[in-house]
Amino acid sequence: MEKEDLRKELKVSAIENGTVIDHIPTQSVFQVIKILNLSEYQNQLLIGTNLESRKMGKKGIIKVSNKYFKSDEINKIALVAASATLIIIKKFQVTEKKKVEIPENVEKIVKCFNPNCITNHEDVPTRFTVIDKSELKLRCHYCEKITARSNISFL
Amino acid sequence: MKRKSLVSINDFSREEHIRILDLAGAFEKRPRQRILEDYVVATLFFEPSTRTRLSFESAATHLGARVIGFSDSASSSVQKGESLRDTILTVSNYADIIVIRHPKEGSARFASEVSKVPVINAGDGANQHPTQTLLDMYSIRKTQETLDNLNVAFVGDLKFGRTVHSLVMALCNYNTTFHLVSPTELKLPSSVKIHIKERNLSYYQYADLQEVIPKIDILYMTRIQKERFSDPIEYEKVKNSYVLRNVMLEGAKSNLKILHPLPRVNEIMTDVDDNPKAYYFTQALNGVFVRQALLASILGVVE
């Protein structure tokens, strides 16, 4: 069993220092890359999709060298990949593992989908209350309209 | 309620709503009291709404306050490209309270966060119009002598009508049974229905107005606008189904009253106006008393 796990891990090679974003729903991998702006990333970046996973069937993984994420970036990941795990690697060793969590409030990172909302017309930082975590429904603090998973976009 | 902004109907608790309605009742008995002589009320109307603006200005003037402001954005610095933030910051230096009407949803909430003085929302796009809701509640309580356990029908454009959305949300605090009469295209949105469901209240949906009339205490009529329909043929098909005529009121309960936020176009025939059940013009007058109550309590002049 252990041997098998090792082989799986090696499908995407290890990094010395940085962050591993594991257990990403496989269809969300490229969304995570886009949200985190990783296409512009200058350091080593390893991406795997459609990897076998006992927990998820198929999963995606992103390994980002020399990068530790700030909490607002972690929140962004949670909105598209609620199942993701963050693994902090220092000198090839796992120093921390944490699950990403959809926050109660989402500030500044999501655009309100209502075109007539004041946040889309004036320099107003967006604020949402998460009213449904599983369906992902965000109520705008300003216009009170609901932005749902299907029409979410990031600032 | 002193210094508390009113942006959304849910900003005030049930107790605060009742307090405002009680105060409005006192102002109805004595509408002219010079209790706001030392105060300046700013009415900032970024889009024209003559009825609402005059109602606020009448309320303020009856209490002796001075009113400053503008009646549409063409005559303000918005024309020069000033941001809402800057306008509010500036005006809150000049006035003790700001009444704002703005075409963008969420503008009043933003204004209340920027402003140094309390803000009353007089309509932000399709979102909220809480002073209309309070005057609707006042009218219901006055004609029915209670707000509790009533059967209320909403008729017409339930999808886009913000007065309907706010009033439905407010009435969820009073064990209301809702009767929703609208064409399929203009049904009450699920974001509003969720409030009814959360309270486990009953609601019934109808496509026919006549059917609902014998069952209800309040008939809240709204206008159906042609431009709300994606298919103009659909509008032609339904437009006459939601028109109230005097003959339709024959089977109604004796306590039934008809409300309408106005302006009316043709959804209530003029032959209804003389029926004692017609209450919409008195309803508009009640708006002055409710706005007096809000100005006086938010400015802290009455407890």
Image (cartoon, coloured by chain):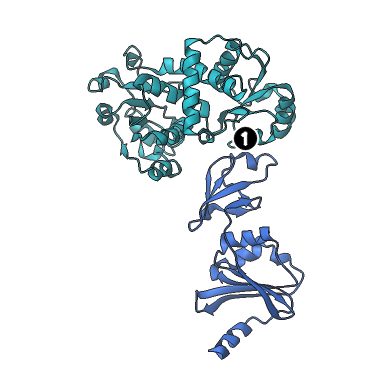
Chain colours: A blue, B cyan
- Which residue does the image show at 51% across and 33% down from the upper left? B9
Q: Residue furthest right?
A: A42
In the rendered view, would you say B278 is above or below A23?
A: above
Q: Residue furthest left?
A: B251
Indicate the secondary structure of the residue bearing disc 1: helix
In the rendered image, residue B50, in percent from the top left (x then y), is placed at: 56, 18
In the rendered view, would you say A83 is above or below B293?
A: below
Could you tell whether B249 is left or right of A50 in the image?
A: left
In the rendered image, residue B164, in percent from the top left (x then y), is placed at: 43, 32
What is the tally of numbered marks visible in this picture?
A: 1
Q: Nearer the viewer, residue A77 or B294?
A: B294
In the rendered view, would you say B53 is above or below A108?
A: above
Could you tell whether A5 is left or right of B245 in the image?
A: right
Is any part of residue A5 visible from this angle?
A: yes
- Quarter assignment of residue A101: bottom right
Q: Residue furthest bottom?
A: A3
In the rendered image, residue B117, in percent from the top left (x then y), is placed at: 68, 28
Q: Nearer the viewer, residue B92 or B165?
A: B92
Q: Nearer the viewer, residue B99 or B11?
A: B11
What chain is tagged by disc 1? Answer: B
Which image quarter holds the C terminus of chain B?
Answer: top right
Amino acid type at circle 1 is Ser
Could you tell whether B28 is left or right of B196 in the image?
A: right
Q: Nearer the viewer, residue A153 or B69?
A: B69
In the rendered image, residue B193, in percent from the top left (x then y), is placed at: 41, 42
- Quarter assignment of residue B232: top left
- Which residue does the image show at 61% across and 74% down from the upper left? A61
Is any part of residue B268 visible from this angle?
A: no
Residue topped by disc 1: B107
**Badge 1 local density, few (<14 within 10 Å), some, or many (20+)?**
many
Which image quarter holds the N terminus of chain B?
Answer: top right
